[in-house]
Amino acid sequence: MKKLFLNNGASINLDFGLLLIRLMIGALMAFYGYEKLIHFNEMAASDFWSKNISFLGMSGAVPLSLTIFAELFCSLLLIVGLFSRFSLLVLGFCMAYIFLVVFPMQILSKGDNGFEFNSAFTYFIIYMGLLFTGVGKYSLDAKMFSK
């Protein structure tokens, strides 16, 4: 029990913390992607996706499909810790695109109850942190690809 509360960055503390972050952030983002998936036809036909979002000259269903791939499928891969670096790169790119292009550099915005922090920027920072630290030993990557 004493080892659990040591403040020396013990491996169990770090790996368990990375697991919790991975599970929570992956589940939150997967819900975004799932909502887009079940409402795909309505969203692809909406003005937002057909007129406001353009990725490499494509609009409508193509960028929506890429977003669903990132938000849903890469988040599920992140939760189980499989191909996590690839998933984090895709998710980070998706959030950076949203932060830089869709809502250009808006870290803070005025909301109903005061200032609101841009969630795409928050997700981007968390994804980059996980990319630099790795996802820990409680992942399929660690089980499959460790020496």
Image (cartoon, rainbow, N blue to C red):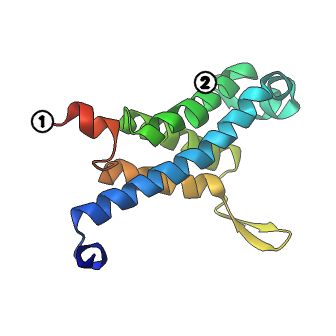
Amino acid tagged 1: Lys
Which residue is disc 1 drawn over?
147
Q: Give the number of the mark in front: 1 or 2.
A: 1
Q: How many marks?
A: 2
39 with respect to 104 (left or right): right
Please say if 34 is above or below 18: above
Instruction: Name the residue type under label 2.
Output: Leu
Residue that label 2 marks: 56
Callout 1 environment at 10 Å: few (<14), some (14 to 19), or many (20+)? few
State the image coordinates of residue 19 (x, y, percent, origin top left): 40, 53
Pick the front one: 106 or 32: 32
**Residue in the picture at 60% in, 33% down:** 72
Is the residue under label 2 in contact with that under label 1 (CB below 8 Å)? Answer: no
List x then y, in percent, for residue 76: 52, 35
Helix, strand or loop for disc 1: loop
Marks 1 and 2, the one that precedes in the sequence: 2
Q: Which mark is residue 78?
A: none
Disc 1 to disc 2, C-alpha distance: 40 Å
